Amino acid sequence: MEQFVHDLWQLVSQPGQLRENLAQIVQTLGGPATTGMLALIVFAETGLVVTPFLPGDSLLFAAGAVCATVASVAADQGVEPPIGPVTLGIALFIAAVAGDAVNYHVGRAIGPVAFSGRFRWLRKEHLDKTHAFFERHGGRAVVLARFVPIVRTFAPFVAGIGAMTYPRFLFYNVFGALIWVGGLLGLGWWLGGLEWVQRHFSKVVLVIIVASVMPLAWEWWKALAARRAAGPGERPRG
C-alpha cells in the first residue's frame, strides 16, 4: 500500500513526467494495480469537486501511449503485455461514468449549501462559469465539459443542483465518457508508438493541456469582450 500511495503521488504531482512515471508503475506494481490507480484518479477528478487539479486529458493520452509501448515490448519478447488498452479503457470508462454520477447526486444533495461561501476552497466563480456553460450548451454541456478542465469537474455537480433530470444526465454522461476515454486513450495508443512523439512526449502533453484549456479561455475572452462592449453600468446580453 505504501508503494501504491507513493506512485500515486508521483503520478499526480509530476504532470510533465506522466509517461515515464506510468511506465515505471506498470513495471513495479503490474497491470491490475496500475489500472486501479488510473481509475481512481479519473473517478476523483470527475467525481469530487475538491480535486479539479488532477490530470485528466493528459493522463488518458499518456496511458494510451504507455499501453502501446508495453504492447510493443511484450510482442518482441513473445509474452502477454501486463496492461492492455481494452481492459484499461473499460475500467476508465466505468470510473468516468461513476465519477460524474456521484458528483451529480452530491450536487443534488448539498450543492446550494456547499457554494454558499462558507467553504473557501469551493470557489463560487467556478460554479458560475459551469452554470453559464450549461445555459449556453444545454444537454451537450455534459459531453463538452469532458474536454474542459475544471468545468469537467463541476459540470455534473451543477447538473445535480437543478440543471437536468437524472435520466437525461445519465445519457449524456455515458456518451461523453465513451468519447472522452475512448478518444484520448486511442489517440495515445495511435501516436504513442511514433518515434517523434516518444522523443517529444512532454511537449505533446503540453499541447494537449493547452488545447484542453483553450475552450475555457475562449469563453472567458468572449465574456470579457461582451462586458467591454456593453460599457460601464450595463450588462451584456446573451
Image (cartoon, rainbow, N blue to C red):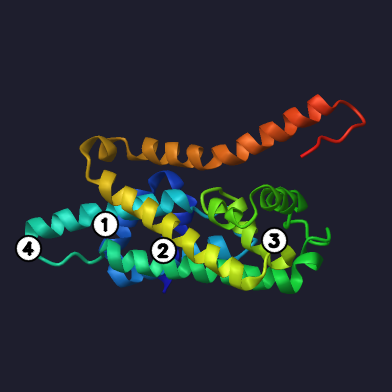
The residue type indicated by label 4 comes to: Gly
Secondary structure, mark 4, is loop
Question: Which residue is identified by label 2?
Answer: 38
235 left or right of 169 in image = right
The Cα atoms of the two marked residues, 3 and 1, are separated by 34 Å
Q: Is residue 122 visible?
A: yes
Q: Is residue 218 above or below residue 187?
A: above
Dot 1 alpha-carbon crowd within 10 angstroms: few under 14, some 14 to 19, many 20 or more? many
Q: Are marks 3 and 1 in contact (CB under 8 Å)?
A: no
The Cα atoms of the two marked residues, 2 and 3, are separated by 25 Å
Q: Which mark is residue 67?
A: 1
Q: Are marks 2 and 3 in contact (CB under 8 Å)?
A: no
Question: Which residue is identified by label 4?
Answer: 78
Q: Residue at x 58, y 71 (%)?
A: 101
Sequence-wise first label, 2 or 3: 2
Sequence-wise first label, 3 or 1: 1
The residue type indicated by label 1 comes to: Cys
The Cα atoms of the two marked residues, 4 and 1, are separated by 16 Å
Q: Of residues 155 and 17, which is closer to you in this image?
A: 155
The quadrant holding residue 100 is bottom right
Q: Is residue 3 visible?
A: no
Sequence-wise first label, 3 or 4: 4
Secondary structure, mark 1, is helix
The Cα atoms of the two marked residues, 3 and 4, are separated by 49 Å
Q: Are marks 1 and 2 in contact (CB under 8 Å)?
A: no
Question: Which residue is identified by label 3?
Answer: 158
